[in-house]
Image (cartoon, grey):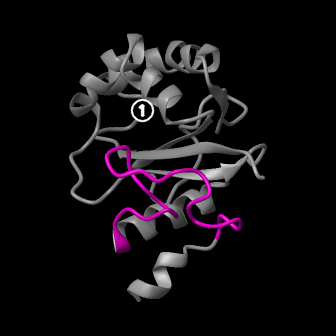
Amino acid sequence: MTAYELAQVNIARLKAPLDTPLLKDFVDNLDPVNADADAADGFVWRLQSDDGDATAISVFGDPWLIINMSVWRDQDALTAFMYRGRHREMLSRRREWFERVEEAMTTLWWVPAGHRPSVAEAENRLLRLRAHGPTPYAFTLRTSFPPGAAGERQGVDRSATSRA
């Protein structure tokens, strides 16, 4: 039986460049929030450049978008981190730094234990969520699926063939 971990990606559209006064509090808190994540129970991995965060990593070829991607033991571990401490405080201030966007900007999916998702994989999952809504291939905190629901090959969304 395959063991799974939970991958998550969220992207945000900046209101201003990262080096402007408007984004100072956000940028100043990146390292502490990332350190909190790294130490959190159930944390497995996060996307980062040599600078220790992911702000320089391109997503959808749009310089106004920033990406956060990580892997967690399970949904409980992810939500415990998200809604506690410094991350919760920063989450409550997101409208100060990021534009409101109508389309989905966050998705979750199960990966085989040890797999580290790529940005292209995350983009694909997010686009699938936008096109088809939550499925075992790409889902949300509100509408989730158990590990392995997409089949042994996590790259195949078996529900897409019935929806196409």
Q: Residue, x 40% and y 19% (percent of image)?
A: 87
Residue 35 showing in the rendered view: yes
Label total for image: 1
Q: Nearer the viewer, residue 39 or 157?
A: 157
Magenta extent:
132-155
Q: Is residue 34 left or right of residue 5?
A: left
Q: Residue, x 49% and y 86% (percent of image)?
A: 161
Category of crowding for the residue at label 1, using alpha-carbon neighbours closer than 10 angstroms: few (below 14), some (14–19), many (at least 20): some
Q: Residue, x 63% and y 26% (percent of image)?
A: 43
Q: What is the magenta segment's predominant secondary structure?
A: loop
Which image quadrant for residue 126? bottom left
Q: Quadrant of the C terminus?
A: bottom left
Amino acid tagged 1:
Leu
Vertical order, 70 against 138 (above or below): above
Indicate whether residue 136 is drawn in magenta: yes
Vertical order, 73 against 135 (above or below): above
